[in-house]
Image: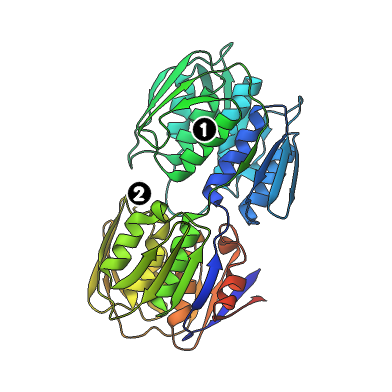
Amino acid sequence: MDKIIIQGGMRLKGEIDVSGSKNAVLPIMAAALLTEEESVIENVPSLWDVHTMVKLLRSLGAKAILENGCLKVKPGKNLKPLAPYKLVKTMRASVCVMGPLLARLGEVEVSLPGGCAIGPRPIDLHLKGLEALNATIDIQHGYVRATANKKLRGAEIYLGGAYGSSVLATGNVMMAAVLAAGKTVIENAACEPEVVDLALFLKKMGAKILGEGSPRLEIEGVRKLHGTDYRVIPDRIEAGTFMFAAAITGGDLLIRKMEPTHLNAVIDKLRQAGVRVDKFKNAVRVRKTGRLKPMDITTLPYPAFPTDLQAQAMALMAVTPGISVITEKIYPNRFMHVPELGRMGAKVYLEGPSAIVHGVKKLSGAPVMASDLRASAALVLAGLVAEGATEVQRVYHLDRGYEHLEQKLTSLGASIRREKE
């Protein structure tokens, strides 16, 4: 098991490129199963989750080769309908193979998924949507078994949940619907860029989809899809993490190969905090030019402030004078980084779904433990500005979603290295 050691106090400066989107590429990889033909997916990041999904595709009988950011997937004719526990348990997004396998094979058996420990994330919306498409669902011994009653049929589906729309459920139901007979309408569909990216990939395969990026998706089922070539969008969460890294270190970063419009809510909040953000066509420049100011943040579905950047924002607010309030509306239990930031001197108090952050003059380096993917990033950001050395343990969480993060930060002037625990 690895740990990351950070010597704080270095100001980040320079230019950095953003990798392909983790949250976009995983469902797209699953969608490649919808045809027998080969698809070529480019801008694929080298991440733990991506390599796990490659193993899952192979276990299902598909040929999958990942080299230098290019993934070739050829499912062929003989796919297996079983996604085993040993692979699915480590990555929640693996549940996305359910829709494609059900659509192609008429049956699928998938282990209940795992992933980050950020509170309960049931798959009830996935199952609700698939049942509406004429599937029978049975859950036994930790596995979900879905079978099509002769054939999937289009339907009107409302994907409302306790915390709003679901990105993965929208994707799963959309992938099943593209081969279902007739028309499917998904109301309260997720509007995130990653859902749009999946829809565009499916349309290049021959699917008929209208309304991507809106709460209403209309899908006309087709008999067959074909292979295609596709380039995945940049990772907006990685880009946002670098934006907060520039702000917290008083740095000056040009963050390239990204889509600024995907982060309008984040840019707005950073500007409110006194950070200068200049937007370009495929880049932003982030500079701390004056005194930081406190801000209030509420995480909500896109296009609002993303839950996946809540922890990184808290790291910045921990060293911002005044009182900031962060309210988590997506995953109310997503505050597992708070005690670890407290070990570094942060003053954060939890009140229900809100965190009250009293900014301190400085943080001090300490041994801390990552509890989930984005908490890991927050602890790294805190370590960049803390006095002394910070050791972040359990960084396998970090490897699930950030491609070569320590190398990228080192290229910008950070003092950071990886060691075996």
- Using the image, determine if residue 162 lies above or below residue 34: below
Residue 263 shows up from this direction: yes
Mark 1, other Cα within 10 Å: few <14 / some 14–19 / many ≥20: many
Numbered tag placed on residue 365 in the rendering: none
Query: Mark 1 touching mark 2, by CB under 8 A?
Result: no
Residue 144 visible within the image: no
Q: Which mark is residue 330?
A: 2
Q: Residue furthest left?
A: 322
Looking at the rendered structure, the kind of residue marked 2 is: Ile
> Residue 335, relative to residue 101: is it above or below?
below
Residue 367 percent coordinates (x, y): 51, 79
In terms of secondary structure, where does tag 1 sit? Answer: helix
Q: Relative to residue 98, is residue 235 depicted above or below?
A: below
Q: Judge left or right: residue 17 versus residue 67.
A: left
Q: Residue furthest top?
A: 150
Label 1 to label 2: alpha-carbon separation: 19 Å
**With 105 as the anchor, is 186 left or right in this view?**
left
Q: Give the mark nearest the N terminus, 1 or 2.
A: 1
Judge left or right: residue 114 versus residue 183.
Answer: right
Q: Report the front residue among 243 and 63.
A: 243
Q: What residue lies at 76% left-to-right and 33% top-to-bottom?
A: 61
* Residue, disc 1: 172
Q: Quadrant of residue 382?
A: bottom left
Tag 2, which secondary structure? loop
- Residue situated furthest front in the rendering: 281
Of residue 68 and residue 416, the one placed in the foreground of this image is 68
In front of the other: 352 or 374: 374
* 323, 147: nearer the viewer: 323
Image quadrant in which you'd find residue 175: top right
